[in-house]
Amino acid sequence: MEVAAVRLLRGSALLRRNFPTCLPAWKSPPGALRASHSEALLSPAGSGLPGAPLQTLSDEELMIQSAVKKFAREQVAPLVSTMDENAKMEKSVIQGLFQQGFMAVDVDAKYGGTGASFFSLVLVVEELAKVGHGYKYAIGSLNEGRIGIAAQMLGLAQGCFDYTVPYIKERMQFGKRLFDFQGLQHQVAQVATQLEAARLLTYNAARLVEAGKPFIKEAAMAKYYASEVAGLTTSRCIDWMGGVGYTRNCPVEKYFRDAKIGTIYEGASNIQLNTIGKHLDAAY
Ligand SMILES: Cc1cc2nc3c(=O)[nH]c(=O)nc-3n(C[C@H](O)[C@H](O)[C@H](O)COP(=O)(O)OP(=O)(O)OC[C@H]3O[C@@H](n4cnc5c(N)ncnc54)[C@H](O)[C@@H]3O)c2cc1C
């Protein structure tokens, strides 16, 4: 049975690849940007430029994000450690992913997909990775796939961070919360900043794909940076949790293990740097 989010998407005008309404310039195909109306939008001083934050989501994207968050929390998270131990995905999770429309998210509905935007797919991967769901999604070609891996690493790192910070706000040592030691708090602030930067790179690369603009360099940057940040974040989270972080009783060590693959598949970090380097060579 189809769930509400997918039914709504499939049966309504939302099926169109809709962008946030505050990003009108991006709705236009590249050719249309040459029109006078669009020039006004692109002018920094132009009154039409909305200047919307990159993380602004359309109604469709918000709906999918909320549906996948609920599915991840209620139906995936409780099974993550079993799936990890058995090195096998639970049947109910695979079935749920299909039933909920979280597979083939950006494939046209007439071919059996959900018909949502590429950006929605990035949100799905990010939310599932937050609960430690390490399944690698086949996303289009290699270059688009790199954005998917960036989203996976971003979600994984964010999930690990979200698990750890409440712990260090509770854990008392030397009469204080761990969080209150400035040496630790600065590390948390640095990681949070890097997570934010990884999110912006990832979302920007996904928006470029949807806008039909060149995205190969940006996809490589997003994949490279998000996977490096995931490695750093998960390693730091183990440090911050101390001995308990190293045990298998809490999910942090799994996030740490899972993060490593991000610097390898869909092109190792050095290969992403090669791609970025080639673009820089051509640009200067
Ligand atoms: C869990 C997992 C899932 C995978 N899934 C898929 C899949 O679905 N589809 C698929 O096609 N492949 C898949 N792969 C393969 C993956 O894409 C490759 O492992 C990856 O591209 C790295 O290639 P490699 O293993 O041959 O390493 P190598 O190319 O041998 O690289 C080893 C090291 O050398 C460095 N290196 C290599 N060349 C250069 C260079 N020119 N300059 C500088 N440094 C360099 C790399 O950065 C790396 O650090 C998967 C791998 C894993 C582990």
Image (cartoon, rainbow, N blue to C red):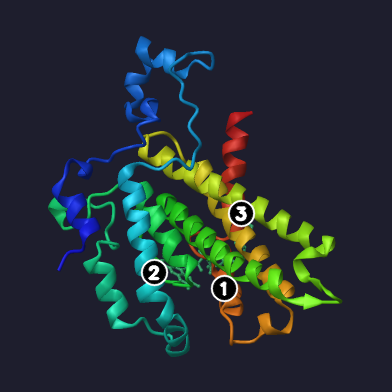
Question: Compared with residue 63, is residue 173 higher up or lower down, i.e. above or below?
Answer: below
Q: Residue at x 57, y 63 (%)?
A: 157
Camera-near label (1 vs 2) is 2
At label 3, which amino acid type do we have? Answer: Leu
Q: What is the spatial separation of the Cα atoms under label 3 and label 1, in whole angstroms?
A: 15 Å
- SS at mark 3? helix
User: Dots 1 and 2: beta carbons under 8 Å?
Assistant: no
Question: Compared with residue 144, is residue 73 higher up or lower down, i.e. above or below?
Answer: below
Q: Residue at x 70, y 76 (%)?
A: 241
Closer to the camera in the image, 208 or 57:
57
Residue at mark 2: 72
- SS at mark 2? helix
Closer to the camera in the image, 65 or 28:
65
Q: What is the spatial separation of the Cα atoms under label 2 and label 3, in whole angstroms?
A: 20 Å
Residue 195 numbered mark, or none: 3
x and y percentages locating residue 167 in the rendered image: 66, 73
Total number of numbered discs in the rendering: 3
